[in-house]
Image: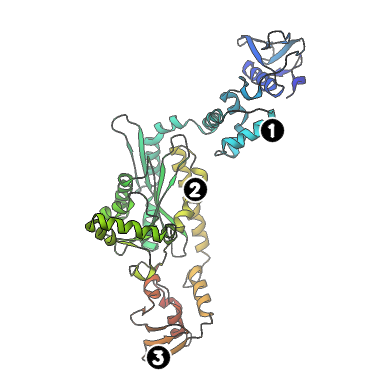
Amino acid sequence: MGAKDLEVGTLFNDAITFKNALRSIAIRNNFGVIIKASDKKRVIATCSYQTCQWRIRASLCEDTQSFQIRRVDGVHTCPGVNRAGNRLATSAWVANEIQDLVKRHPDIPPKEIKSNLEKEYGLSVPYMKLWRAREQARDAIFGSVDDSYKWVPTLKAELLERNPGSHITYTFDSSDHAFQRFYVSFKVCADGFLSGCRPLISVDACHLKSKYLGMLLSANALDGNNGLFNIAYAVVETESKQTWTWFLSNLGDTIGRNLHPLAFISDMEKGLGDAIREIYPEAEHRVCIRHLCLHNTIDFNEKLAEVSNVSPKVHSYLLSLPYKWSISQFMIGINHAANTNNFAESFNSWIVEARNKPVVDLVDIIRGMLMEQRDMRKMNSMTWHRELVPQEEEYIRNITTRKDHLIVRQSSVWKAEVEGVHSRHIVDVEKRECTCRVWEVTGLPCIHVVAFIGMKEHPLWHSYIDEH
């Protein structure tokens, strides 16, 4: 609207709509407004500048129940107001103006809102007012964050009713009954992990962006086709040994605590190592090599030497910690050589738009995403008609067409020595071993095994690949 829209006869839905429109027009045209009288039947306003004679009056139309401008007296003779401190631009007004923007982009940064208001109204609004306005707009569109917590017990009951046998729990602070944590693992996810995924679990945490922040902890695996497979996720107040122990304890109640073999991979999150050793003492704990390489090796060794000078016992303890990053040291039977935590990052990116929602909405949005993902994969798998899944077929196709110029010296039906340009390895097909260890660690035949098996006529490749 422009100033010309404040004309006698212009209709509005009600008094509130009229006052909102008046405020927006005043801000856009750089004049102040004082409401002299206001009720359901009439609104009278004047210019805020004392010597300006501009005045407007609107009232209720009895026959239509709409609100109409009856009089506009005088013209503006005021010098305008300070756009940086315009009192009419309250956080409530800004929230109303940006609702469409926030609906499309709930996590829109305040600086982007500021840019839009400057372009539309020539208005400069303080950062904190923009932040409050965005929160108010979110509440108006998606519901109040504060009110959402009262639905936590109902959410648990509904999820269990729709997903019998799932492990879903929450906690409240015993002192003030404030919400603390919410854990979700659907039965179909737990069963799917136990029956169809490699025993390698990526654990990670990411920051939430709603009013009260918090962290989202997650446990993810890879299915037989290397697809991301969520096992469990939880909203917690912060990342610590206590919250990780709580999360892994619930995970243990979900999938069991005596799985073997079992490996975890992480970015060495705060308190996670201690929690894994407490809940899963026999499990392997891999460290993301990319995260490890971010730290300067020279500085690390210098600090470790300082520790040794202060306390040799502590130095020995640190060296004995069972973190693993080298593929050559990985446990046999996991059937995956992952030494980066990429699939955890994939999960965090996948659910990024849900991370700014209140806890009830966040939990339900992720539930819906998991349901759609499972359904899509089920439909895709119905088109597979071979012994191997597509990812393994591609692996075999690629490795059998490599030109490594290997020399195979067969010593028996099951054994051979395979020599390359820079290395020589012993392959034992009966024991499913190669001295390069790739076959044992990944469950997939390495290039040396492929060179030996490829000498046979029509090899059945699926018989040389481990399950999962």
Q: Mark 2–mark 1 contact, CB under 8 Å? A: no
425 and 196: which is toward the camera: 425
Estimate the spatial distance between the alpha carbons at disc 3 and disc 1, rounded to whole Å.
77 Å
Could you tell me the amino acid type at mark 2?
Ile
Crowd around label 3: few <14 · some 14–19 · many ≥20 (10 Å) = some
Name the element at disc 2. Answer: loop
Crowd around label 2: few <14 · some 14–19 · many ≥20 (10 Å) = some
Q: Which of the 4 image quarters holds residue 199?
A: bottom left
Name the element at disc 1. Answer: helix
Does any portion of residue 280 appear in the rendered image?
A: no
Looking at the rendered image, the quarter that the C terminus falls into is: bottom left
Residue 61: percent from left, percent from top: 69, 12
Give the label on residue 119, or none. Answer: 1
Residue 220: percent from left, percent from top: 41, 55
Give the label on residue 351, or none. Answer: 2
96 and 379: which is toward the camera: 96
> Which residue is under mark 3?
410
Q: Mark 3–mark 2 contact, CB under 8 Å? A: no
Estimate the spatial distance between the alpha carbons at disc 2 and disc 1, rounded to whole Å.
32 Å
Residue 325: percent from left, percent from top: 38, 64
Does any portion of residue 338 appear in the rendered image?
A: yes
Q: Which badge, 3 or 2, comes first in the chain's sequence?
A: 2
Q: Which badge, 3 or 1, comes first in the chain's sequence?
A: 1
- 461 lies above or below 65: below
Q: Which of the 4 image quarters holds residue 39?
A: top right
Could you tell me the amino acid type at mark 3?
Gln
Name the element at disc 3. Answer: strand
Could you tell me the amino acid type at mark 1?
Lys
- 99 lies above or below 284: above
